[in-house]
Amino acid sequence: MPFWLKWVALPIAGAVVAFWVITAIIHAILGSLLTLALVVVAAGALYWGYNKVMMEIPAYRRKKLRDKQRKGLY
């Protein structure tokens, strides 16, 4: 490799590799956050749906109301 090429090609290659590494790290972080957000939304939807269905059962609704009233006593 000619002497002058080392001073031109190596810094460019270093910048390209650094950009590639930084991009990979950012992609991994954003991918993890997106996955976490989707899991939280899915868990919230399941919780909401479960309570919505269970509140249709009169005995469950009475128990929840009774528990809610007792909670205020303590």
Image: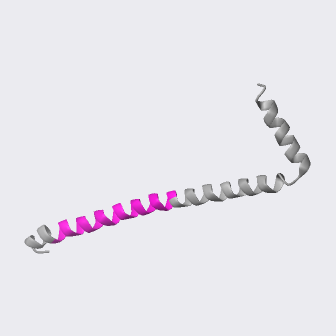
Magenta region includes residue 27 = yes
The C terminus sits in image quarter? top right
The percent position of residue 26, horizontal first and vertical second, equals: 40, 60
User: With 37 as the anchor, is 24 left or right in this view?
Assistant: left
- Colour scheme of the rendered structure: one colour
Q: Which region of the structure is painted magenta?
A: 9-33
In depth, the one of 47 and 31 nearer the eye is: 47
Q: Determine which quarter of the picture holds residue 49.
A: bottom right
The N terminus sits in image quarter? bottom left
Residue beneath the point at 8% across and 71% down = 4
Magenta region includes residue 65 = no
In depth, the one of 19 and 71 nearer the eye is: 71
Residue beneath the point at 85% across and 37% down = 66
The percent position of residue 11, horizontal first and vertical second, equals: 18, 65
State whether the magenta stretch is mostly helix, strand or loop: helix
**Residue most toward the top?**
74
The percent position of residue 20, horizontal first and vertical second, equals: 33, 66
Residue beneath the point at 72% across and 54% down = 48
User: With 66 as the anchor, is 2 left or right in this view?
Assistant: left
The percent position of residue 33, horizontal first and vertical second, equals: 50, 57
Relative to residue 71, is residue 42 depicted above or below?
A: below
User: With 7 as the anchor, is 24 left or right in this view?
Assistant: right
